[in-house]
Image (spheres, rainbow, N blue to C red):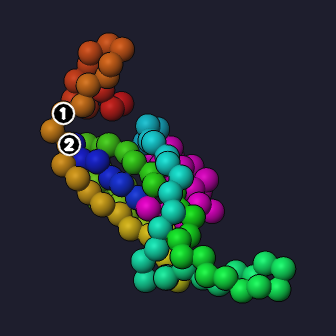
Amino acid sequence: MKKIEVIARPEKFQELRDHLYGIGIGGLTVTEAAGTGRQKGKQGLFRGTTFEIEVLPKLKIELVVEDQQVDEVVSLIMETCDTGTIGDGKIFIIPVEESIRIRTGEKGKEAIL
């Protein structure tokens, strides 16, 4: 199993979630985040005063999938979240040693389905 962590633009989440559900991926965790990379923030204007916004709002989306699903899920994420501009986000793929559903004690792929 692999854990896929996605840092993405908030406005892309609804479309991404719908596409993931469409291929049978229903379990995911979403966390509001803020960060900066090559985008380096942006300038804001408040009551005539310019200020620097050093971090930008993002979402961190986490899901665990079986090894054979990784390529399909990553391709879907890239197609859905790509706007062609800087700040589209990142994808991280991390090995998962085990998963256990707390309520039933199911392990492995049964725990993530």
Quarter holding the C terminus is: top left
* Dot 2: element: loop
Instruction: Please identify the residue farthest to the left as the structure is shown.
Output: 97
Identify the residue position indicated by label 1 in the image.
Answer: 98
* 19, 82: nearer the viewer: 82
Q: Which residues are magenta?
A: 7-24
- The amino acid type, in three-letter code, at marker 2 is Val
- Any mark on residue 4, and which? none
- Is 16 in the magenta? yes
Left or right relative to 98: residue 77: right
- Is 87 in the magenta? no
Magenta stretch, overall SS: helix
Is residue 12 among the parts visible in the rendering? Answer: no
Identify the residue position indicated by label 2 in the image.
Answer: 96
Going 38% across and 68% down the picture, which residue do you hit? 90
**Rendered view: 22 above or below 52:** above
Is residue 58 among the parts visible in the rendering? Answer: yes
**Rendered view: 1 above or below 37:** above
Instruction: Please identify the residue farthest to the right as the structure is shown.
Output: 47
Going 32% across and 13% down the picture, which residue do you hit? 104
Asked if disc 2 and disc 1 are in contact, CB closer than 8 Å, the reply is yes
Residue 30 appears at what percent x and percent y? 49, 46
| Residue density around tag 2, few if under 14, some if 14–19, many if 20 or more, within 10 Å | some
Going 57% across and 56% down the picture, which residue do you hit? 13
* Dot 1: element: loop
Residue 87 appears at what percent x and percent y? 49, 76
Residue 70 appears at what percent x and percent y? 28, 54
C-alpha separation, residue under disc 2 versus residue under disc 1 = 6 Å
| Residue density around tag 1, few if under 14, some if 14–19, many if 20 or more, within 10 Å | few
Quarter holding the N terminus is: top left
